[in-house]
Each structure stands twice: as C-alpha cells, then as structure tokens.
Amino acid sequence: MDISQLNFRHLFYFWHVAKRGSLTHAAEQIHTSQSALSTQIKQLEGRLGRPLFDRRGRHLELTATGQQVFAYADNIFGLGEQMLGWLEGRDEGTTFVRVGSVSTMSRNFQVNWLRPLFRDPTVVLSVDSGSLDTLVERLLRHQLDVVLANEPVPSDPARPVSSRFLGSQAISLVGRSDRWSGTTLRVPQDLDAVEMAMPSTRHSVRTQFDALCFAAGVQPRLRAEIDDMTMLRLVARDSGWITMLPQVVVQDELQSGELVHIGESSQLTEHFYAITIQHTQITPPLNQLLLRATEGEVFS
C-alpha cells in the first residue's frame, strides 16, 4: 500500500470518531449518519489490515494501532486546520499546548518549566491536574500533549509512553526565619520529637523520609501531612513547624528571607519527569521545553 491508496476521507472520519469516542457525537459534528461513519471506518480498517477500535457497547476505545494512527491523523488534520486559520487571518501560527500535572507536583516547578511559553504570543496553554493514572489515560486518548509527574511511567504495548527525566532536587527542611534562623539540623538524626509538617504518604519522598527515620530510630512529632504542595508552602510560612518539601516549592519565601533552610539529606530527592506518547510528533514549543531539561535550565 502506498500513499495514493490511502483514503483521507476515511481517515478524517476516523479522526473525528477517535476524538469523541462516539459515533453519535462525531456524526452530529460532521453532519453525517452513524451508519455512514461506521462503514467508512470499517473500510479504513480493512485497508490497513488492523482494527482501530475495540467496541464495548456504545463506547469505542482505541486499540494500540488506533492510538498510533490517531496520533498521525491528529498531526495531519491539526496542521490542516492551522493552515486554514492562517489563510483566513485567524489564529496566525497558534499552537495549543495541553499540559497535565499530578496533583502533588509543585506549582512553582510547573511555572518555572512553562515560563518560556508565557512570552510566546502564538501559544495557547492549558494546564489540568489530577492523579497520574487519570492523566496518562487522557494522554493516551490524545487529550493532553504532556504529563508532568514526580515518578516515571513504565511503557508497555497498552501504554506506549516515554518518561523523560527533567531534573531532580534535594528535599529540604525549612522553617520561619523568626524562629529557626541560624539553625542547622541533621536529617534524620536531629528530628526526634521535633514538630513537623510533611507531604502525605501519597508522595514518594514521604516514603523515603519515613524509611530513614525508622532506620535511625527517630520519630518526629507529626503536626500536619498535606497532599497539595501549595498548601504545604502556606503551612511552612504561617506555622512555627519545620516543614519538609522540595526547595522549589518555597523558592520565593527563601529568597525574601521569610523562610530559612535548616537542613537536607542527599538520600531525600524528588525527581521530575515529562511523560509523552512514543513516536508522536511534538509541537515546537513543547519540544523547546523538553530541550531545556538537557541543558540544565529546568529550575531557572
């Protein structure tokens, strides 16, 4: 089969159905019948020699082949829409970048990483948060372009993703300067019975920290465990407790002197990853962000 044998109308119909996961919604969008859509997609599957959808009741789910074909179709018709917009004087060169971020990810890290896009007038940015599994599922459905996470995602035929390492940062102990200025504590040796606020047990560094304390026979006095990094930053700022978190979370408070660095351990590190779909074309603005990691600018 060569390119002249590929029916792009069939591919166009498949693209619409895949975006909406429903024959009904796609038929309404492009003003045709469900039976016509179904027939055209079956013809495309016959020509390609592989199924593109798993049909589960009224819902359609992309097969592994379907996901890859959709990625190519999305590039083809997405660029076509951009071209028409440019010809008509609309959205000249506009690029949409859809980012998912796990709910435990530092907002400061997200802003640091995304900041170059703020200066690009051709980019429209959307950022959603949620659980890692939910975001990866949306990524595979091509509802997101990248997922920011603090752990990698294994790749397999059902989830053909790539986890690109963006950088890492030691976990710090911080406290209010009016109480802890000039104090340095060893981690975890000096933390027995010390009042602390920490990430919740859903956070990977909390597991690391608990293991260190157990091995050293140390038991801090837990005053708060918080899932959201923004809330944990506010607790660090407004309480007198020592707070354990990635330094990037409180970068502004450390710079202003409102909080001070008290200690850290090389054994407590948070890693940051950008998760994308394998073999999918990445838009230039997003690719520039990924290249920043290799140049060591991710925390700049």
Image: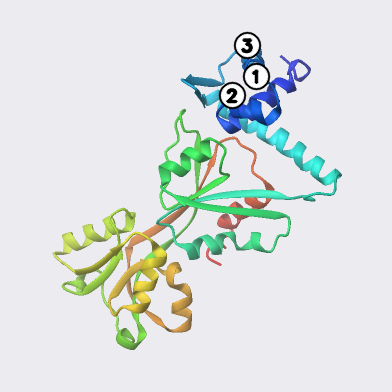
Q: Which residue is mark 1?
A: 37
Identify which amino acid the numbered label 1 is placed on: Leu
Corner quadrant of residue 44? top right
Corner quadrant of residue 50? top right
Q: Are marks 1 and 2 in contact (CB under 8 Å)?
A: yes
Q: Look at 28% across and 69% down and name the residue there.
A: 197
Nearer mark to the viewer, of 3 and 1: 1
Q: Which residue is mark 3?
A: 46
Q: Look at 39% across and 58% down and name the residue there.
A: 270
How far is mark 1 from mark 2, CA to CA? 7 Å
Crowding around mark 3 (Cα neighbors within 10 Å: few <14, some 14 to 19, many 20+) is few
Q: Look at 31% across and 71% down and name the residue there.
A: 243
Task: Give whichever of 80, 299 is nearer the camera.
Answer: 80
Horizontally, residue 295 falls left or right of residue 91, namely left
Instruction: Give the structural element (helix, strand or loop) at label 2.
Output: helix
The reply to whether residue 118 is visible in this rendering is: yes
Q: Which mark is residue 23?
A: 2
Quadrant (top left/top right/bottom left/bottom right) for the N terminus:
top right
130 vs 279: above or below: below
Instruction: Give the structural element (helix, strand or loop) at label 3.
Output: helix
Identify which amino acid the numbered label 3 is placed on: Gly
Nearer mark to the viewer, of 3 and 2: 2
Q: Are marks 3 and 2 in contact (CB under 8 Å)?
A: no
